[in-house]
Amino acid sequence: MYRLAFKNFIRSRSVIIVLILFLIVGIISIVIGKRFLDKQQTAIEAVTALQQEQIARNVHNVRDQFGLLMYYLRFAYINKPDAAASLAIGQQDVNSSIQYLTVRGLEAQRYDTDLVNPYNQLTGNLDLSFVILFLFPLLIIAFNFNVLSQEMENGTWSLIRVQIKKPLRFIISKLSIRLVVVLALLFLLLTLAVVIIGLPLSVQLFAYAITAVLYILCWFAISFLIIVLRMNSSISALLLLSTWVLLCLLTPAAINNYLTAKYPVNEAYETFLKQRDGYHTKWDKDHDSTVQAFFKHYPQFSHYEWRSPGFDYIWFYAMQQAGDDEAAGNTKAMQQKLHQRQQAADLAASFFPPMHAQLQFTDIVGTGLKRQLQYLDSTAAFHESTKLHFYPKIFNNSPVDGENWSQHKPKYFQATNTVNWMTLIMPFLLFILAPSWLATYIFNRNGKL
């Protein structure tokens, strides 16, 4: 009987058309993800060649002033996305994965992003996570809204109740048929992603698949709860679509607006102003105080002599550091607020399946806000190490040809991308078990339907 019901469902022309349509959309999302990776790789190759070229050109043109040379030289620090990032592009939509920095003030450079079309930023990328998060629930709603109401409207429910000892099993079997079809579509798309993009079989891919499966089960549990309310097909469809709008659109937007208002990042603009003013105002201030502040920050350089009041590279780079030092408080406050936003979003997502799934997708593949904040923190460490390498050569005015310039190649951000299985699974279990238990209770209480 189960096999017959499965054949009848899968042979439906409307089901076939919908599955083909979703397959096409899924393939498009996979291709978009691959193009994203290709674009990132092209940018990495371009900045690698650019760094080598600009170092060679400037070293050739500036041979006698190491300080002047370092004013121009830039060094790339790259947050290379994992291959799985193509499945959930996340923060990579708006934040650059390449920092191309000089040894001058960091805060004026760290938050630079790529120039992109604002309309593309508004619409975002149609990656596979978007298809799973927003379109798969619509497919589940279309499959499930009339599982019970259709039997009641056709007058066959009474016959089923008489012939089957446990009518609940009949409802669950119909839902399981649709679940098998949806999961088959999901795993087909994941298989195509592995083939088209060349994804390695990794823990991240496994965690991504587990997240998608659990998210789908959440929507089947919600559908189960709605259909046992014994509404007619139109009302059931309306309730399910309203739930989709509430969970996928309204709630995330409301939470985002609340977090933005509660943790406003006014320090972003203030950081830029303080860094700029901290540097530019030093031109008109006593040079000695600027240099002494620099020596206090870097006591290991306090033995260097500098020419006062004339121009000196110690004083010039001390001005650059002064800008960062004056903006340090705002930078710390801004980072703290961003971390608070992330923590509050994680807490709120524990109660809403789409938000939880979205955050898990981006965390798993390394494109979320957590990874971006780690990258920015690591950028500061990279900038600091670069400065500490070149400052002695600048202050000693070392021979330009004495530096091994071939060793200065782009550096890569190394992140530990672990999966917290407890955090991933537990909220989903709540989302699945609570509606399922409530639906079973309602169905059994109204056993004489």
Image: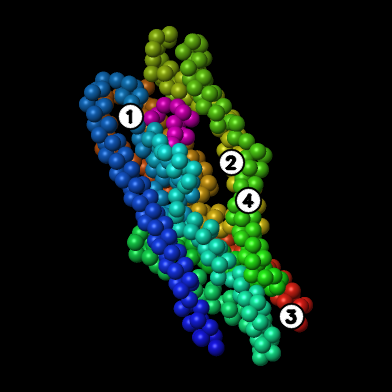
Q: Residue at x 65, y 38 (%)?
A: 261
Q: Is residue 266 left or right of residue 400?
A: right
Q: Nearer the viewer, residue 238 or 84?
A: 238
Labelled disc at residue 392: none
| Residue 401 shows up from this direction | no
* Residue located beneath label 1 in the image: 73
> Of callouts 1 and 2, which one flags the residue occurring earlier in the amino acid sequence?
1
Q: Nearer the viewer, residue 337 or 378?
A: 337
Labelled disc at residue 449: 3
Q: Are marks 3 and 1 in contact (CB under 8 Å)?
A: no
Question: Which marked residue is nearer to the observer: mark 1 or mark 4?
Answer: 4
Q: Nearer the viewer, residue 394 or 177?
A: 177
Element type at marker 1? loop
Q: Where residue 16 sits: x, y (%)?
A: 45, 72
| Residue 117 shows up from this direction | yes
Above-or-below relation of 254 to 404: below
Q: Amino acid at mark 3?
A: Leu
Question: Which marked residue is nearer to the observer: mark 3 or mark 1?
Answer: 3
> Of callouts 2 and 3, which one flags the residue occurring earlier in the amino acid sequence?
2
> Of callouts 1 and 4, which one flags the residue occurring earlier in the amino acid sequence?
1
Q: Amino acid at mark 1?
A: Leu
Chief SS of the magenta region: loop
